[in-house]
Amino acid sequence: MDQGRQDLGSRTTEAHTMKTAIVVGAGPAGLNTAILLANRGYQVQVYDKRVLGSEASKRTYIISVSPRGAKALIEAGVRIPQQGHAIEGLASGARIESQLPSGKVLEMRRLSPTHFFCERRALIEHMVNEAKRLHPTAITFHFDYGLQAVDFERKQATFASAAGKTWTVQYDLLVGADGVNSVTRAQLQKALQQLKVEKHDSDRSIKVFSGLEKPADLVLSDENGSYLRFLTGKNVTRGGMVVWTSPSGHISGAFGGLTTFMKQLQTAKDYETALRTDFPQFPAQFLGDAAAQMEDCPLTLCSASVRCSQLHGPSAVLIGDAGHGVTPTMGQGAVAALESTAVFAKVLDECNGDIQRAVELFTKRRLRDAHALFELDRTANQRLGNDGKLNLHFLGNVFHMWRGRLLHKLAPGIFKGPAVLHMANGDITYAQTHAVIKRDRIVIGGLLGMGLAAAVAGAGVLVSKRLATQGFSN
């Protein structure tokens, strides 16, 4: 039996068999949903406006898939990289490191075997191949076809190619997994007055580079193997760089910062100057090669945060960024999207083929976590100090980390440590994480308020004593 693959036939019921599911979007969430549906007997058609392996690969970026997201892949039967099981473009058994402008490595953490990272393009190509391996006939792909319109009453979706060819298909289930700028979501908004959407574009953008040779004089790690390193630039509010060493030894990464700053960089020389200023520890040749690639690739917005009042419509469901998008700040975008695919598969099983009941139940099961993740993402830069300002969110996060580690040290069998660190493993829900962080922020706010009140009271006593003394002297 393939690694991580369960008895797929046991999940195929007569209620699901031969129903047609249309999946809009061939990203990780869309592909995993397609496989999970095919596992249950659906005939699945996957549509994506981009061409696989096209120029869009220049806008790929590195994603980290923690055990929380890997569980959904394993449940679908998708092989993931583990120590001793290499998959091209994907790396596991590695480390995540964080480096300060001074060059000091702040954190060196070895990943669990089911925690891997890769270029998004490589993961998509791998998952397409896995879908074809698992379901050579049940899943069909239609690249270069973007969604144009949906008739929810007739259950018909119309797609169009870049060349202008249109195609209308009938469906039993429509899955919108087409990202933060989801056309599926926009179509649902037209059809459903009660569907409210809140969307905030990130204020940060990135430029990527990939496949660079590792210079002989570049020392990034004291161990062999793959790893991901986050480097903070000398100007923390401007941006930073993430560098990934692949299993082949090549280096890929991204340089990013506030969009207002990134738009000022136009030429390779501009990028090279910025890189040399912020990351002098890298050899000049390496930075020059990275800068040359950055000039040729488009500037990419760091996604957006999306909050929806519901995640479903008539025989339709929004999965991943289409329904609950977040920025890359916390590294939860792809992970949360993959987790949603598993949640939806579970409610489908519970509803035994009743699609409308399943999509409604999905909203009930997932919406609270989706909204909590939105709030966590909204305040992430403040909590992490990325805005360079001292604020209550940052102080609350410091208190949260200190309190969590202290309690874990005192009673490790009861307390696991800071809740925010356990999001990666899925040991705690997003709603629970948000509640704990919010509580700690309120506590530190209360302590600061009490301290301020005590200081004011103390000052009042001193002033009263001085006035009293002056009164006696007069």
Image: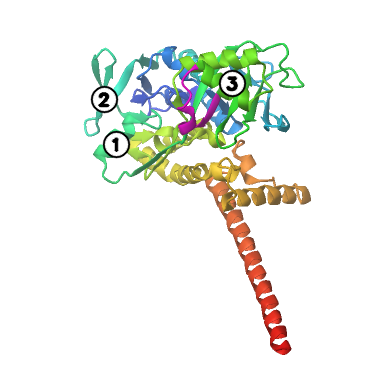
* 264 magenta-colored: yes
- SS at mark 1? helix
Residue 274 position, x and y percent, is 57, 24
**Figure check: 41 above or below 443:** above
* 9 magenta-colored: no
Residue at point 70%, 84% (across, down): 470
Density class for disc 2 (Cα within 10 Å; few <14, some 14-19, many ≥20) is: some
- SS at mark 2? strand
117 or 317, nearer to the observer: 117
Range of residues picked out in magenta: 255-267
Residue 296 position, x and y percent, is 46, 14
Picture quarter containing residue 353?
Answer: top left
Amino acid type indicated by mark 2: Gln
Amino acid type indicated by mark 1: Leu
Residue 4 position, x and y percent, is 59, 23
Picture quarter containing residue 349?
Answer: top left
Residue at point 28%, 33% (across, down): 187
Q: Which residue is mark 1?
A: 188
- SS at mark 3? loop
Q: Quadrant of the N terminus?
A: top right
How far apart are the two marked residues, 3 and 1, measured between alpha carbons? Answer: 34 Å
Residue at point 52%, 33% (across, down): 328
**Figure check: 128 above or below 71:** above
**Figure check: 61 above or below 331:** above
Residue at point 36%, 35% (across, down): 317
3 or 258, nearer to the observer: 258
Density class for disc 1 (Cα within 10 Å; few <14, some 14-19, many ≥20) is: many
Density class for disc 3 (Cα within 10 Å; few <14, some 14-19, many ≥20) is: many
261 or 416, nearer to the observer: 261
How far apart are the two marked residues, 2 and 3, measured between alpha carbons? Answer: 34 Å
Q: Which residue is mark 2?
A: 148
Question: Which mark identifies residue 80?
Answer: 3
